[in-house]
Image (cartoon, rainbow, N blue to C red):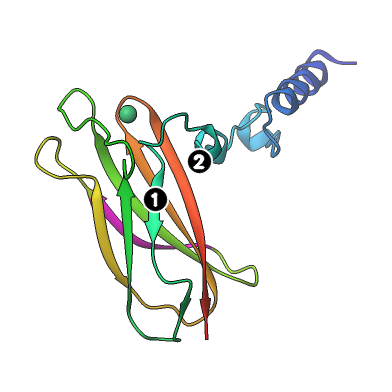
Amino acid sequence: MKRREAFISSAAFIGLAAGITALDCSKENGGVAMAKFGDVLISPENEGREKHVPHIETASKVAAGESFEVKIIVGKEVPHPNTIEHHIKWIQLFAKEDGGRPAVHVATFDLGPSYVSPTITVPVKLNNTSTLFALEFCNMHGVWENSVKVEVE
Ligand SMILES: [Fe+2]
C-alpha cells in the first residue's frame, strides 16, 4: 500500500470512529477527510438542564398558505445567562418540506447581549407538511438544535 493510500485509509477509519459519516477524499480536497457541520450540532437529549435547547412553540396542524406563529424560546424552563460574557448570539429557523426537498432558511435573529431575551416569534406560511428546525448559538456552549413537525391541511 502506497503512503498516500495508507493515509486516506487511516483518515477514513478515524472519521468513522469519530462518527463522521460523509468523507470527501477527492483529489480536489487534497485527500483529507471532511467533517460535517451537523456533527457539531448539539441535540436536546444532550442538555442536562434545559437552558440551551431552542424550545419551539407552534401549531401541530395549519392551513396551507395561511400565516401562523412560530415562537422559539431559549431557556424556557431554566433561563440562560444573558451577559456580554455568556449569551445567546443568534437564533435561526429553517423549514424542510416532506418529500426530499432541501431545507430553506426562514429567519435569522441576531441578538444583542443583556438587552434582548432569547425569545423570538416569526409569522410563517407553509404549503406542505414540513419539519421546522431551530438552531441557536451560545457564545460559550456552541450550536444547539431542535425540531418539530407541522402538518399542513
Ligand atoms: Fe450557554
* Residue closest to the eye, 116 or 80: 80
Q: Is residue 43 above or below residue 19?
A: below
**Residue appearing at x 39%, y 66% in the figure:** 58
* Residue closest to the eye, 34 or 126: 126
Q: Secondary structure at mark 2?
A: helix
Magenta stretch in the rendered image: 103-109
**Residue appearing at x 23%, y 26% in the figure:** 86
Disc 2: CA contacts within 10 A as few (<14), some (14-19) or many (>=20): some
In the image, is 33 to the left or to the right of 43?
right
Tell whether position 108 is magenta: yes
Q: Amino acid at mark 2?
A: Pro
Q: Position of residue 54 (x, y in %)?
A: 38, 47
Check mark 1 vs ligand 1: CB closer than 8 Å? yes or no: no
**Residue appearing at x 32%, y 33% in the figure:** 138
Q: Amino acid at mark 1?
A: His
Q: Quadrant of residue 32?
A: top right
Magenta stretch secondary structure, dominant: strand
Q: Which residue is mark 2?
A: 44
Determine the quadrant in which ligand 1 lies: top left
